[in-house]
Image (cartoon, rainbow, N blue to C red):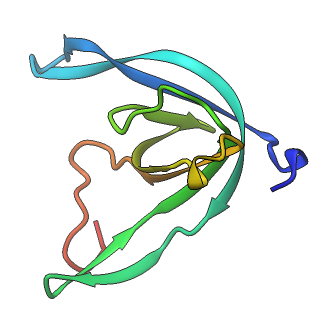
Amino acid sequence: MNAGDLRHLITFQEPDGTATDDEGNAVLVYKKVCDTMAAIKDVSGRDFYEAAAHQMENIVTFTIRWRNGLRNDMQIVYGGTVYDIVQINHLGYRRDWTQIKVRIRQPQGSEVSAHGYL
């Protein structure tokens, strides 16, 4: 990994309680934890079969310098898109780099069918 690859600004956010939306539903509210520079590897559109159902996942991998305190309940915002953290890999605990696999969050009410279509 080259430090020059870290050219994308991402924002980590953590849950900060709940609020009520216009319809009266409770929604999770997030607050900013930090901004950091990241390298991005897009592996989106990977098809896979699970439990005999064809599904699509939009997976991206962010690589950042080692950072303590990252949790799976956080989210990442990059370019106006919200990503849910799927896995945090500290790359052998060398304390150099951390890879974070994330999934693009689907907007409410846009569930993907078993065939990958809206």
Labels in figure, total: 0
Q: Residue at x 59, y 19 (%)?
A: 34
Q: Residue at x 37, y 47 (%)?
A: 105
Return the residue nearer the eye: 110 or 60.
60
Horizontal placement of 51 versus 85: left or right?
Answer: left
Q: Residue furthest right?
A: 4
Q: In the rendered view of the protein, which quadrant contains the C terminus? A: bottom left
Return the residue nearer the eye: 17 or 88.
88
Residue 106 x, y percent position in the rendering: 34, 49
Residue 90 x, y percent position in the rendering: 55, 48
Horizontal placement of 21 versus 79: left or right?
Answer: left
Quarter-wise, where is residue 108 in the image?
top left
Residue 102 x, y percent position in the rendering: 46, 51
Q: Is residue 43 above or below residue 19?
A: below
Q: Residue at x 14, y 82 (%)?
A: 51
Residue 114 x, y percent position in the rendering: 19, 76
Q: Residue at x 24, y 22 (%)?
A: 28
